[in-house]
Image (spheres, rainbow, N blue to C red):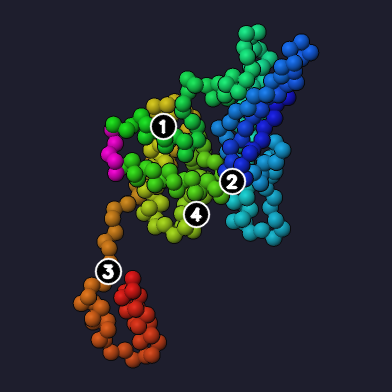
Amino acid sequence: MAITVFTQSKKDLAPIYIRVRQGGDSATGKGIDAKAKTGLLVNPKRFERGVFKDYRIPKGATAKVKVEIKEKQKALNELSNLLDALIGKVKVRLNNREDYEVINSDWLKEVVTPKKSEISTLLYDYFDYYLKVKHDEIASATVKKYKVAQSLLNRFQKGYGIVYIAKVDKAFKREFYAWMQQEGYSPKYKVKTLKIFITMCYHAGDESELSTSPQLYKLARNENSKDTSEVPQVYLNHEDLKKIREVKLKRETLEIARDWLLISCDTA
């Protein structure tokens, strides 16, 4: 009986499938061909023919680039270990199956993702579970805020890799904050978004009894100590623009800068 793993999509994050196949016997002519999603996602460029392709550090890479590549490789290694464990689980169930068990896709799905457990260890998926169990307790505005954070996480994962609840730690924070800065988000918004991720992880650990990072509680204390109060909004009204338009300037460069400022304000 052959077990294979593969992807079917070319998207940045593609589901990994597992397949169990066996040719038909001489008596019945019936064989086995069962397929199921593993619940794991991978960049297809890093997974070909069931084999993970390691990241390579290019010659002349800066220290920062080396750290980034090592973190990505670490995440890839963890994904590989999870997949190996899942394949091992399927092998054990196959070797110890009862005579009455019919090996098909439904059987394989039950082995991979038991119906009795709808709780995912992926942070992105856990948002859906959290909102499902908390739908009567949180306001619609809060739900919207959580959905936005979940969407941001999905965008971040396209370059970073899958984020597991147990891996929300200092290294994740460093990578996520760097990405948020690159995308142009404010420091205040970075803190607020990470706090939402921490909320999910707290619930996963306390209520769902999932594994969380040993660094989570310290991470939460550090983020809660930061001031995320609203910064006063600074804007120009019509009176301010009139003063700017009428002020006498001594240099042509300043006049040009003023013209562009006024044009920008008039045209939004």
**Marks 4/2: CA–CA distance:** 24 Å
Tell me the amino acid under the disc marked 4. Ala
Looking at the image, is mark 1 or mark 4 nearer the viewer? 1
From what the image shows, is residue 70 above or below residue 26?
below
Point out the image quarter for the N terminus. Answer: top right
Mark linked to residue 235: 3
**Marks 1/4: CA–CA distance:** 28 Å
Element assignment for label 2: loop
**Residue at which label 1 appears:** 129
From what the image shows, is residue 89 above or below residue 150?
above
Answer whether labels 2 and 3 touch (C-beta < 8 Å).
no
For the point 69% across and 44% down, the residue is 54
The part of the image, by quadrant, that contains residue 73 is: top right
Element assignment for label 4: helix
**Residue at which label 4 appears:** 178
Magenta segment, which residues? 137-141
Element assignment for label 3: loop
Q: Is residue 133 or residue 182 the one in the foreground?
A: 133
Answer whether labels 4 and 2 touch (C-beta < 8 Å).
no
Mark linked to residue 32: none
Looking at the image, is mark 2 or mark 3 nearer the viewer? 2
Q: Is residue 104 visible?
A: yes
Looking at the image, is mark 2 or mark 1 nearer the viewer? 2
**Residue at which label 2 appears:** 11
Residue 98 percent coordinates (x, y): 63, 9
Point out the image quarter for the C terminus. Answer: bottom left
Q: How crowded is mark 3: few (under 14 residues within 10 Å), some or many (20 or more)?
A: few
**Marks 4/3: CA–CA distance:** 28 Å
Residue 140 sits inside the magenta stretch: yes
Residue 164 percent coordinates (x, y): 51, 37
**Marks 1/3: CA–CA distance:** 41 Å
